Image (spheres, rainbow, N blue to C red):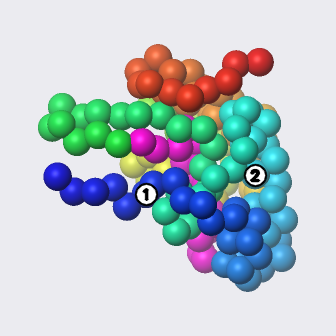
Amino acid sequence: MAKNKTTETTVDVFDFIEGYVDKDQKKQDSFKLIELLSEWSGFPPKMWGPTIIGFGSYHYKYASGHEGDAPMLGFSPRKAQFSLYVYSKTEKSDALLKDLGKFKMGKACIYMKKLEDIDISVLKGLCMESIAYLNEHHECAYRSY
């Protein structure tokens, strides 16, 4: 069975941002996302793979037998745009997307250029809905306040 490439690492998140992100605005947005996602998830940021900053974790297992761990919430400050890993396919999440702002949607990933393009309160709603979904359907490490 193939080994997961995206696993938690010991790389320092802040060192990663300083060394990887080359634009000041993207650095500021990255630090703000760290603040928000830490607050909403209750977990500190950890590097997952070479470029994903994740918060908390959950264990998944597919019908095929493939299983692994992934961050509950996360993002990556990619060169062209941010990739946000904060979405779970639910009716509530789909309704929230309508008010999120300026973004593009992948299969389960939200792409945005900068934080000011989206509504932070809607982003929080998406994150909380995703955490609730993951808690209901997977084994999660989640702190409830």
Residue 11 visible, this angle = yes
Which residue is depicted at the point 44% across and 25% down? 139
Rendering coords of residue 127 (x, y %): 64, 34
Front-most of residues 47 and 102? 47
* Region in magenta: 69-86
Specify the amino acid type for callout 1: Thr
Mark found first going from the N terminus, 1 or 2? 1
Magenta span: predominant SS is strand
Q: Give SS at disc 1.
A: loop
Q: From the viewer's perspective, is residue 41 above or below residue 25?
A: above
Q: Which residue is mark 2?
A: 33
Q: Which mark is residue 6?
A: 1
Q: Are marks 1 and 2 in contact (CB under 8 Å)?
A: no
| Res 80 quadrant in image | bottom right
Rendering coords of residue 3 (x, y %): 28, 57
Q: Is residue 117 left or right of residue 85?
A: right
Q: Is residue 57 left or right of residue 117?
A: left
Front-most of residues 136 and 84? 136
Nearer the camera: disc 1 or disc 2: 1
Q: Is residue 80 left or right of residue 7?
A: right
Which residue is depicted at the point 43% across and 57% down? 6
Which residue is depicted at the point 53% across and 38% down? 57
CA distance for labels 1 and 2: 20 Å
Q: Would you say residue 53 sits in the magenta stretch? A: no
